[in-house]
Amino acid sequence: MAADRWLVWDFDGTLGRRTSGWSHALLEVLQRHAPGLTTSADQIRPHLLSGYPWHTPLVPHTYIATADQWWDMLAPVFARAFMAVGATATQAAELARRVPAAYVELRNWELFADVLPVLGQLRREGWAHAILSNHVPELPNIVTGLDLGEHVPHVFSSARIGYEKPCAAAFDHAWRAMGRPKTVWMIGDNPVGDIAGAAGMGWPGILVRKTDPGVQYCCEDLWQVPAILARA
């Protein structure tokens, strides 16, 4: 029997994180494959502020059918950053091809300490879990590698479904895949992408790890989530 109460979680900043961000991933590539180019993550970061699909979240990319195609879309962004810190165009193109493997290395990812206990408690209370995140194609592998997979039967990455939060189609895709449940809450750390986006589907939301005066339910960590759900 399909679950009738679902919690849809954001991933980055909510359940887990890469211990160092995109600029550090590019820096790692440089250190391994072009050590002569001396630079820092701070010098790379300004060149990564546009070009990702979540920078234009209302523009669908359903025409991208594979993980390789998704990463190919970002290759010019990475190459531009590498050239900005001194790489030649040929060298930058080669370095850009190495970013995906560096970014998804599991050793660079971690869950927050409250995640497994709280998700386990909520499962025992009858909630089913899904993840809906603006993320890379390999997000399901990251979730499994962090031992979160047993709690989360569905992992929806924008890279795979072709829509970015807060686009309504992203939430609708998840809702249909979950069996169109009547009771769904969204939990995330972005008041626009997560909470406002979910409100468009009629889902209540909980903003976690920060507060916002425009959001009804906010909490500093996940430990408070079960109490909010019980009171609502």
Image (cartoon, rainbow, N blue to C red):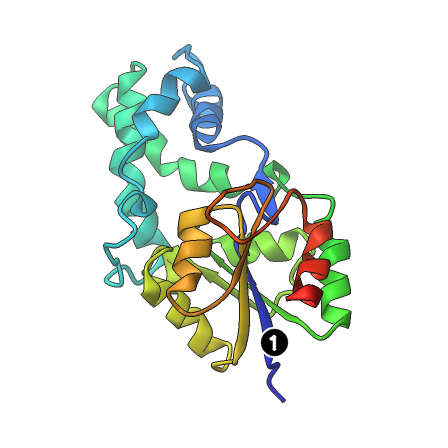
**Quarter holding residue 49:** top left
Total tally of numbered discs in the picture: 1
Looking at the image, residue 88 lies above or below residue 114? above
Kind of residue sitting beneath label 1: Arg
* Residue 26 x/y as whole percent: 42, 28
Looking at the image, residue 85 lies above or below residue 49? above
Residue sitting at 33 percent across and 30 percent down?
48
* Residue 205 x/y as whole percent: 52, 59
Q: Is residue 128 left or right of residue 184?
A: right
Looking at the image, residue 184 lies above or below residue 98? below
Residue sitting at 38 percent across and 71 percent down?
172
Foreground: 62 or 174? 174
Residue sitting at 26 percent across and 58 percent down?
61
Foreground: 202 or 139? 202
**Quarter holding residue 169:** bottom left
* Residue 6 x/y as whole percent: 59, 72
**Quarter holding residue 80:** top left
Q: Secondary structure at mark 1?
A: strand
Residue sitting at 72 percent across and 59 percent down?
227
Foreground: 195 or 128? 195
Residue 136, visible in the rendered structure: no
- In the picture of the structure, the residue carrying the numbered disc 1 is 5
Foreground: 65 or 12? 12
Which image quadrant: the C terminus? Answer: bottom right
* Residue 86 x/y as whole percent: 29, 14
